Image: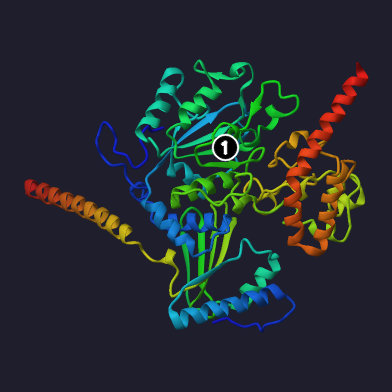
Amino acid sequence: MTTNSSGKKNLTTGRQPETLSDMLQRRGVSRRAFLKYAAMTASLMALPPTMANVMAANLARARRQSVIWLSFQECTGCTESLTRSMRPTLEDLIFDFISLDYHHTLQAVSGHAAEEARRNAMKENKGKYIVIVDGSVPIKDGGIYSMIAGMTNLQILEETVNDAFAVVAVGTCAAYGGLPHADPNPTGAVPISDLVKDKPLINLPGCPPIPEVMSGTLSYVLSFGKIPELDHLARPLSFYGETIHDRCYRRPFYDRGLFAKSFDDEGARKGWCLYELGCKGPVAYNSCATMKWNGGVSFPIQSGHGCLGCSEPNFWDMGGFYKPLSTGLGNMGSALAGAAVAGAALGGGSAWLARKHQGEYMKNLVDHEKDKAGQNSKKEN
Amino acid sequence: MNCTKEFTHNAPFVHVLMHEITVLLGDLALNGKEGAIDLRGLPLLDQDKKQLEDLLGRGEVSAIVNIMGETQIWETAYSGVWWLRHKDTGDKVISDQVAVTIIPEILKTHKSDVKSSLERLRTVFKTEEKREDGNSHDHEQLR
């Protein structure tokens, strides 16, 4: 861990920090590493391949980006995803490109020294550092349900974000509240977007997010000095621009009306579509179907299980992981099912329609489940 | 050169890609403008990619760059059309690109690397000189 990393001079030595190119050259790594890394990142982000050269040149000139990582109501799965799911590969370079100045799980120091490291990083990189947040923030009862160093999560967030360049909400808990926000939300958990209104915010949802999505987004910011193009939920379009269903290798079976009816029937064994087994692929915007997991080995649908829709708001309260999207959820459910069926013929049109209805559909779904829970509780009483 | 197979229309996407490569090569020939196609994001089956690779064939130049895993580069049977295959340290292909260029950027030595290697070479040379000076001094003392 270092405490000085961006373009500012070191307060004690007065020296300008070295560029990423200088740093790698010192280790005997040539500029070709940047070209290869940039080619991979541009490919992941669907940037024009010729942009890779520009990206490589910008990365080489950049200085290490100060990053302060705040962990609130979370399970550390997002950190696990970024740090442990890859063998020594190109993505590891991200740890050379950033200076992780504060991270509860990964930093060596603890207690007052840790908090001092955070404040030093904020001071030395004022206006330039990136704050990554994983976990939701509890605000009920004065925020007492999660406190660090005598401060509530909300106090730490407000203090840290104040002089940040941008904020990245990593994981579904930070992006939408996630599991802590699930009904009945006992701690009053809220997403970062409810609290940070005056800084550029990027949401990278997923439970956890794909590691390359995290490293790719950070590399983009570092290379181009701006945040990538985002969708209506502040997610980078390059990673969350299409549904799992749009890019699923089982899609041809869906188009032909071939569905598995149970997890061990003939259809399941033949790899047919898992829509009727509750797959949320048609309403889940993420890159799992193309980027996959564990170094591109597989993703849930390829392993025989439907998508849970973990990159969508309120996925925990969507009425059951094994409940088909089209069943018993009022008009919105049938409208979406209709859109999906139309998709078999219309391709991109269904994606547009599905996205258009998605917000309302999700809201309906959650309201429906809450009503049902309320009715059940009345019956019990 | 190994080029070879004729265009067939049984893989329409490959046919479209061949057309795009032709357009890009025309741009390089007439205007010196470089281009590239990233095959990763396209809905190509493995056999489509193989067919494209076979159609483009192999030319006179091939190279391997060893950095963070192997990168295989070859000029196809069509001069100015290169294939770049990036692999990770586990030998898994992470990116396939067709680059239409005089020479792929990754094959060139960057100026900053030249400077760095010059410094390293000078350091090694000085060390060698000192060692040799030391040795000749020892020899004189022995005499």
The spot of residue B12 in percent (x, y) is 71, 75
Instruction: Classify residue A276 as left or right of residue A171.
Output: right
Q: For mark 1, does the 10 Å Cα neighbourhood hold few (<14), some (14 to 19), or many (20 or more) residues?
A: many
Tell which subunit mark 1 falls on. Answer: A
The spot of residue A228 in percent (x, y) is 53, 51
Residue A144 to residue B114: above or below = above
In depth, the one of A153 and B121 nearer the eye is A153
Pointer 1: what residue?
A: A169
Colour convention of the picture: rainbow
In depth, the one of A152 and A218 nearer the eye is A152
> Which quarter of the rendering shows the N terminus of chain A?
top left
Instruction: Classify residue A135 as left or right of residue A336.
Output: left
> Which quarter of the rendering shows the C terminus of chain A?
top right
The spot of residue A86 in percent (x, y) is 58, 43
SS at badge 1: strand
Task: Identify which residue is drawn at 73% across, 29% down.
Answer: A182
Residue A207 visible? The answer is yes
In depth, the one of A367 and B107 nearer the eye is A367
In depth, the one of A32 and B60 nearer the eye is A32
Task: Identify which residue is drawn at 78% across, 43% down.
Answer: A361
Task: Identify which residue is drawn at 61% across, 79% down.
Answer: B19
The spot of residue B49 in percent (x, y) is 65, 69
> In the rendered picture of this protein, how many numbered marks are placed on residues?
1
Amino acid type, label 1? Ala
Instruction: Classify residue B117 as left or right of residue A352.
Output: left
